[in-house]
Image: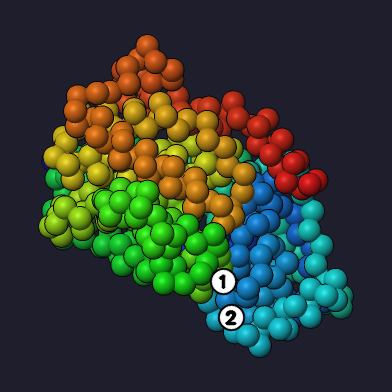
Amino acid sequence: MLTKSKRNEIIALIKREVVPALGCTEPIAVALAVTKARELLGTVPEKIELRLSGNIIKNAMGVGIPGTGMIGLPIAVALGALIGNSEYGLEVLKDVSDENVSKAKSYINEERITISHFEEAPSNLYVEATVSAGDHTATAIISRDHTNFIYLSKDGEVLYQEEEDAQQSNGDEDDDVKLDMKTVYEFATESPLEEIEFILQARDLNKKAAELALNGDYGHSLGHMIKERGVRYFGNTTVAHMISYTSAACDARMGGATIAVMSNSGSGNQGITATMPVVAYAEDCDASDEQLIRALTLSHLTSIYIKQNLGRLSALCGCVVASTGASSGITWLMGGKYNEVCASIKNMIANLAGMLCDGAKPACSLKISSGVSTAMMSALLAMNDHCVTKIEGIVSDDIDETIRNLTNIGKESMMETDKQVLQIMICK
């Protein structure tokens, strides 16, 4: 068993990475930066100037903003300028009301907001918000992490600036705990239950989001349609339940529902995908609370491990990461041990590697559904002694090397793809 000290470090890591988030985290990060700058300014700004990295723009263009019935950055920015509370972190806009939205629409129409693409941003997650009123200005910069402020100033006076060494790092490679798959598995399956039962909060939050969408009309309503109209094609099966619940939670989040979800590594969709397939499978097979806790921990920590290597934002769709985590949790619930879990991860990587991210949007539920169905297939293969071998594609014998192969492609080889995707999105 891992030492108590090591377990405590991993628990702290999970609690940093698995947190509630209201709305898509990229526009919310922008709203958070604007909110902080407004708080420093001390009044509602007359003008807002934003410089954003490409990945922030890509993931904020087509997603619904909770409680507004609107999509995209302007409404998130305006609400941040009017009513945001930076103490709420990724729930910065949770006080939104119909009256606030009406005021925010007027704010947008007055053309107070300027948004530009900062092509030379030091991080692919970068938000620089400068607000002004009269002769006074304030600036807040978030970088590398959705809530990580690296710079604050008012009227030219620097109030806070992160150390240069920290700014030059990418953040994702500097986590306190260096994980490997063996450590992830041992932590999830051997830690005292009372130390990890907090992960059930992910089930509680994300299941509420799924149930909201299953009984409503959000995004493309994929989860609702599979549940209500897809029985003829998918049957009343565990796979159908996994897909409908997971895609429904995504429908709610991408459709702008005013409900928080439990995120993973800065992404609500990743948190949903690491949670709901495991929950749906566990419920169908009458798993115990302990089994669900350990499977969810394995799923979320596997996702965190992969994201440590990949980075916060990349050209690779986050559902590849989170559904790989889900497959590991499902495999364990099926009775699989370490070797079978590793096999399921290799099977996932052999299938979904290269799925590109073209921004956060309602259609994310389609990609997530692909990941969920693949998670089940990969688990079934693993449990029947079938694993993609090293002579096939990017899979290696070593599980950690296989994960690095995936993440190297996502954060390095696909960079030009990412630029092309953004260009298409901006120009169409």
Q: Residue at x 26, y 62 (%)?
A: 200
Vertical placement of residue 344 versus 107, above or below: above
| Kind of residue at disc 2 | Val
| In-image side of 263 versus 292 (left or right) | right
- In the orientation shown, which residue stands out farthest toward the bottom? 99
Q: Is residue 414 visible?
A: yes
Q: Give the CA separation, mark 2 to mark 1.
A: 8 Å
Query: Which residue appears at 41% of the width and 67% of the height?
Result: 214
Q: Name the spot of residue 95 as percent of width and height, x first.
A: 55, 81
Residue 376 versus residue 204: which sits nearer the camera? 376
Residue position marked by numbered label 1 in the rendering: 66
Quadrant assignment for the N terminus: top left
Label 1: few (<14), some or many (≥20) within 10 Å?
many
Q: Residue at x 49, y 37 (%)?
A: 310
Q: Quadrant of residue 402?
A: top left
Location of mark 2 (residue): 96
- Which residue is depicted at the point 69% across and 70% down? 75
Helix, strand or loop at mark 1 = loop
